[in-house]
Image (spheres, rainbow, N blue to C red):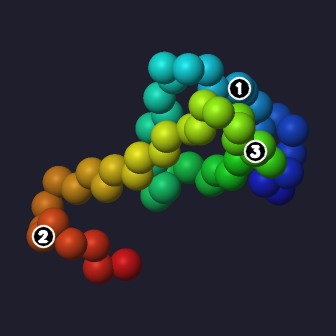
Amino acid sequence: MLADPGLCHNFTMEAGDIQFVNNLATCHRRTAFIDHPVHKRHLVRLWLRDAGWRGYDG
């Protein structure tokens, strides 16, 4: 069911692009990635919460 082409969206991120994904509402993955030898990508993971402690209880 998730492999249905009508449910998939492919895109290429460019310099300066940002992506927000809600892991509770979105099924997502990425295709193979080869980093540039000089200009390495910079990935930041940010956990946004509206209640509870700063820690994450899994």
Camera-nearest residue between 36 and 33: 36
Counting residues from the N terminus, which is met first, the one under dot 2 or under dot 1? 1
Residue lying furthest front: 38
Counting residues from the N terminus, which is met first, the one under dot 3 or under dot 1? 1
Q: Which residue is mark 1?
A: 12
Which of the two marks, 3 or 1, is nearer to us in this view?
3
- For the point 77% across and 43% down, the residue is 34
Query: Disc 3 and disc 2: Cα gap in Å?
Result: 34 Å
Q: Are marks 3 and 1 in contact (CB under 8 Å)?
A: no
Which of the two marks, 3 or 2, is nearer to us in this view?
3
Residue 41: quarter of image: top right
Residue 37: quarter of image: top right
Q: Which residue is mark 3?
A: 33
Quarter of the picture containing the N terminus is bottom right
Q: Which residue is mark 2?
A: 53
Q: What amino acid type should be assigned to the residue bearing mark 1?
A: Thr
Counting residues from the N terminus, which is met first, the one under dot 3 or under dot 2? 3
Q: What amino acid type should be assigned to the residue bearing mark 3?
A: Phe
Instruction: Provide residue 4's location: percent of width, then percent of height.
Output: 86, 45
Camera-nearest residue between 28 and 14: 14
- For the point 65% across and 33% down, the residue is 38
Where 6 sits versus 12, above or below? below
